[in-house]
Structure formats: structure tokens, C-alpha cells
Amino acid sequence: MRYTRYCISGRLVVRMIDTGVETRISTGDFFGIPPGHDAYVEGADRVELILFAPPEHQH
């Protein structure tokens, strides 16, 4: 399942395991991440995200 996310603060680097391609996420970005990734915080600031899930997946 792929969710839409929104970055409230900080910087996140997402790396696709199979290709090694990295994408940098910053404050104000909307993004989706497919399965098969790793991620790490870039810098000293805390990363805060909002996860948007389709209504049928909310509990």
C-alpha cells in the first residue's frame, strides 16, 4: 500500500534499496514512497510527517 505523506518539518532522505536512488524530502513536500526503501534524517532537525491513508484503511 502506498500512502501520501506531507513533511511538516526537517529533512528526510529516502533510498530505494534495489537501485540506490536517493530522494530528499523537505518541509512542505508531499510525497509517496513505494515498498523497498530505507530512509534517514538529514541534519540535526527532527522530521515530522503526516500520513494520509485512504478511508478504507483508517481504524
Image (cartoon, helix red, strand yellow):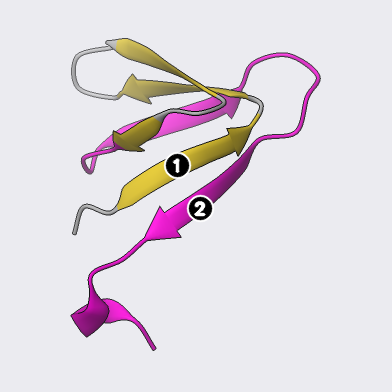
Q: Nearer the viewer, residue 30 or 47?
A: 30
Q: Is residue 43 magenta?
A: yes
Residue at the disc numbered 2: 50
Looking at the rendering, the stretch of residues picked out in magenta corresponds to 32-59
Residue furthest bottom as drawn:
59
Please name the residue shown 21% across and 52% down the image.
2
Query: Which of the 4 image quarters holds residue 11?
Result: top right
Which labelled disc corresponds to residue 33? none
At horizontal 43% and vertical 28% (from top left) the residue drawn is 29
Residue 13 x, y percent position in the rendering: 49, 19
Q: Is residue 21 left or right of residue 9?
A: left
Reply above or below: 55 against 3.
Answer: below
Q: Which residue is mark 1?
A: 6
Is residue 14 shown left or right of residue 56? right
- Assess whether mark 2 and mark 1 are in contact (beta carbons under 8 angstroms): yes
Kind of element beneath mark 1: strand
Give the vertical position of 44 relative to 9 (above or below): above
